[in-house]
Image (cartoon, coloured by chain):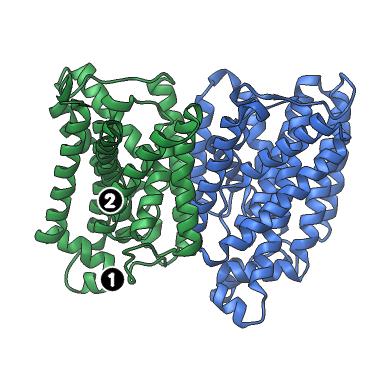
Chain colours: A green, B blue
């Protein structure tokens, strides 16, 4: 029983981080109408930003987290400006196709660049708060608590930003109709850059938070990317609350699956296959997800 | 320039036949691997360029074909060519199954689904190591009992020719038109009487079958098979080859594969930088030359022809109308 509770708590922490990643993906999708296949790679890069801010600049982990988020935002904005602008031009045919290939290519390029720059070996930045918490029989690493807490703060900040600020309203307006948004004086180009930057910032922040728990490696984004797709599709493409709920669900489900899979030597690898299987079932049965928004569709 | 296609084919075949006699074993190996990638890139281009179905499970089908053939040969001592045929058939079956499942999915959903499918294939192959030897790699019986690479070269050439002929016939039949109609607008194609379901399943079956065949040949040629064949990086390489060559021409995709693979060998001393280069090349091609690098060059050569090429894509036709 104690084991089940600890696994549930661990799963909850992981689920919050997964929700942060997935919300970034869904934000980019609802605003730019493009599925970012390089989202997992932005998550990976964010982790390395934090690592090198700590080891090279000598900052402590919390300021490094802020630096990683800011740097990921900038990287996202630059990538959007340089690669995604054909998506907004009427001369570009079959935009979904362009979006798939360009982000897939970006993922391959970023992953291999990371392999050269950062090396293939796992790197682990110092803990946010060293040690573990013990409540009676339960033991939870501090880093998991920090990651979960900071994840909630990030999600809350994002929801506040989208719902209560002018720029957030502009994001929502463009996601509903680019033309109408332009008519009321919103510059869609800026909103696209902001949206993609925010998506990258969320992915990068999640990478920085998870780095002390699972270490960093250039290929760490592949699995998270698939998981983020699972969550986004389960929650409904373009729905932020849907992604948050689905993220926590998937985190819990995976954690318990790993704990109770009959063959422990294969539990870890099959827990990855598990979420992918969930994805396949949802895609076949209900492609719009639980809380899918009607107006957010492919063009 | 009326018979340019014919001249080009004759010249290429002559070149390919002479090539094996003049170069050393290393460059023959490079040519064999290029041709395997050529089959993979061309069959992917059939799906992506002609039908507009962006499947990232292509390399999963290649490893499915490879493992099927290798295990059949190992367990039941089936003759290797029969094993390869079984790999082809199984991949084609799975491909049509995926095509059927994906009927309701469009664009990014299909891409995500196939990415997920290939992850599952890779994870299962890695985890079931009693059967597949996992990451250590499965030892595979050779196709030919010879130390020389030259016979393999001719087999590869034959397979590439077979693949291009079959896919060329499909693409030049009315199915080719159906494919492009489905790519441009599924509803409109369906309303005009195109059987969208059959077109998609046929395309998936043909493309996946050839991917399986390429994977099986690769396994029996190299002699060792790891789940890495189905990895995302391998998929990225094949996508880069097809895009750089040109998605809407099968021979251009093969050209892209040969070009990228040769470049990969020439730049071997640069190590992993090559893959960054190919990623960047893929991005630049997509960003600035969406029709690929080879296909438009070939088109320019053909421009002298009085009548437009049959292969002219609807995109170019539409541009022509506008002008």
Q: Position of residue A297 (x, y in %)?
A: 38, 67
Q: Chain of mark 1?
A: A
Q: Helix, strand, or loop for circle 1? A: loop
- Mark 2 Cα shell of 10 Å, populated few (<14), some (14-19), many (≥20): many
Question: Which dot, 2 or 1, sits closer to the camera?
Answer: 2
Quarter of the figure with residue B156:
top right
What residue lies at 35% left-to-right and 60% top-to-bottom? A237
Q: Helix, strand, or loop for circle 2? A: helix
Q: Which mark is residue A23?
A: 2
How many numbered circles does the render carry?
Answer: 2
Q: Position of residue A144 (x, y in %)?
A: 22, 31
Q: Position of residue B306 (x, y in %)?
A: 75, 68
The quadrant of the image that shows the N terminus of chain B is: bottom right
What residue lies at 80% left-to-right and 29% top-to-bottom? B74
Considering depth in this image, is B24 or A132 the residue closer to the camera? A132
Cα–Cα gap, marks 2 and 1: 20 Å
Q: Is residue B108 visible?
A: no
Q: Is residue B123 visible?
A: yes
Query: Is B56 left, or right, of B214 in this rendering?
Result: left
Same chain letter for marks 2 and 1: yes
Q: Chain of mark 2?
A: A
Query: Is A276 left, or right, of A210 in this rendering?
Result: right
Q: Position of residue B174 (x, y in %)?
A: 75, 71
What residue lies at 17% left-to-right and 51% top-to-bottom? A158
Q: Label 1, on which residue?
A: A177
- Mark 1 Cα shell of 10 Å, populated few (<14), some (14-19), many (≥20): some
Query: Is B91 left, or right, of B23 in this rendering?
Result: left
Disc with the residue nearer the chain's start (2 vs 1): 2
Quarter of the figure with residue B70:
top right
Considering depth in this image, is A234 or A58 the residue closer to the camera? A234
The quadrant of the image that shows the C terminus of chain B is: bottom right
What residue lies at 40% left-to-right and 50% top-to-bottom? A229
């Amino acid at each position: 029983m104690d084991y089940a509770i600890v696994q549930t708590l661990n799963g909850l922490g992981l689920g919050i981080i997964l929700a942060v990643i997935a919300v970034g993906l869904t934000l980019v999708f609802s605003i730019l109408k493009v599925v970012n296949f390089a989202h997992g790679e932005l998550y990976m890069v964010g982790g390395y930003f934090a690592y090198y801010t700590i080891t090279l600049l000598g900052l402590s982990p919390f300021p490094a987290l802020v630096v990683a988020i800011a740097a990921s935002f900038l990287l996202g904005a630059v990538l959007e400006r340089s690669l995604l602008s054909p998506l907004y031009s009427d001369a570009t045919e079959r935009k979904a196709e362009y979006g798939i290939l360009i982000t897939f290519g970006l993922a391959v390029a970023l992953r291999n660049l990371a392999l050269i720059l950062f090396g293939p070996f796992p790197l682990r930045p110092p803990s946010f708060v060293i040690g573990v918490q013990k409540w009676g029989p339960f033991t939870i690493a501090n880093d998991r608590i920090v990651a979960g807490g900071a994840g909630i703060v990030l999600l809350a900040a994002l929801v506040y930003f989208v719902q209560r600020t002018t720029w957030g309203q502009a994001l929502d307006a463009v996601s509903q109709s680019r033309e109408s948004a332009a008519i009321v004086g919103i510059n869609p180009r800026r909103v696209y850059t902001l949206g993609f930057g925010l998506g990258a910032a969320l992915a990068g922040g999640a990478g920085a938070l998870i780095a002390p728990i699972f270490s960093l490696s250039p290929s760490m984004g592949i699995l998270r990317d698939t998981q983020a797709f699972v969550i986004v599709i389960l929650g409904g493409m373009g729905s932020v609350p849907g992604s948050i709920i689905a993220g926590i669900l998937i985190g819990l489900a995976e954690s318990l699956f790993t704990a109770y899979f009959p063959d422990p030597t294969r539990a870890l690898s099959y827990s990855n296959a598990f979420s992918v299987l969930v994805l396949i079932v949802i895609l076949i049965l209900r492609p719009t997800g639980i809380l899918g928004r009607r107006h957010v569709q492919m063009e | 320039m009326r018979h340019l296609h014919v001249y080009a084919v004759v010249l290429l075949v002559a070149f390919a036949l002479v090539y094996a006699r003049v170069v050393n074993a290393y460059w023959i190996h490079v040519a064999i691997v290029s041709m395997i990638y050529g089959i993979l890139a061309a069959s992917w281009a059939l799906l992506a360029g002609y039908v507009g179905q962006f499947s990232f499970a292509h390399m999963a089908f290649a490893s499915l074909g490879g493992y099927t053939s290798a295990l059949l040969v190992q367990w039941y001592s089936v003759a290797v060519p029969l094993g390869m045929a079984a790999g082809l058939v199984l991949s084609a079956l799975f491909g049509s199954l995926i095509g059927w499942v994906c009927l309701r999915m469009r664009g990014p959903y299909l891409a995500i689904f196939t990415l997920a499918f290939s992850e599952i294939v890779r994870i299962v192959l890695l985890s079931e190591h009693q059967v597949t030897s996992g990451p250590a790699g499965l030892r595979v019986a050779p196709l030919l009992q010879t130390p020389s690479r030259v016979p393999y070269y001719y087999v590869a050439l034959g397979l590439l020719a077979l693949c291009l002929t079959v896919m060329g016939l499909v693409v030049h039949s009315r199915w080719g038109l159906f494919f492009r109609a489905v790519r441009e607008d599924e509803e409109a194609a369906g309303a005009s009487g195109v059987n969208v379901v059959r077109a998609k399943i046929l395309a998936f079956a043909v493309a996946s079958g050839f991917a399986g065949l390429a994977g099986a040949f690769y396994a029996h040629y190299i002699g060792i098979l790891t789940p890495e064949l189905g990895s995302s990086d391998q998929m990225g390489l094949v996508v880069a080859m097809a895009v750089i060559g040109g998605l809407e021409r099968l021979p251009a995709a093969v050209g892209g594969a040969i070009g990228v693979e040769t470049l990969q060998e020439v730049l071997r001393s640069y190590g992993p930088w090559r893959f960054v280069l190919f990623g960047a090349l893929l991005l630049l091609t997509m960003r600035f030359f969406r029709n690929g690098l080879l296909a438009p060059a070939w088109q320019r050569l053909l421009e002298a022809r009085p009548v437009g090429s049959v292969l002219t894509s609807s995109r170019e036709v539409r541009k022509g109308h506008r002008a």
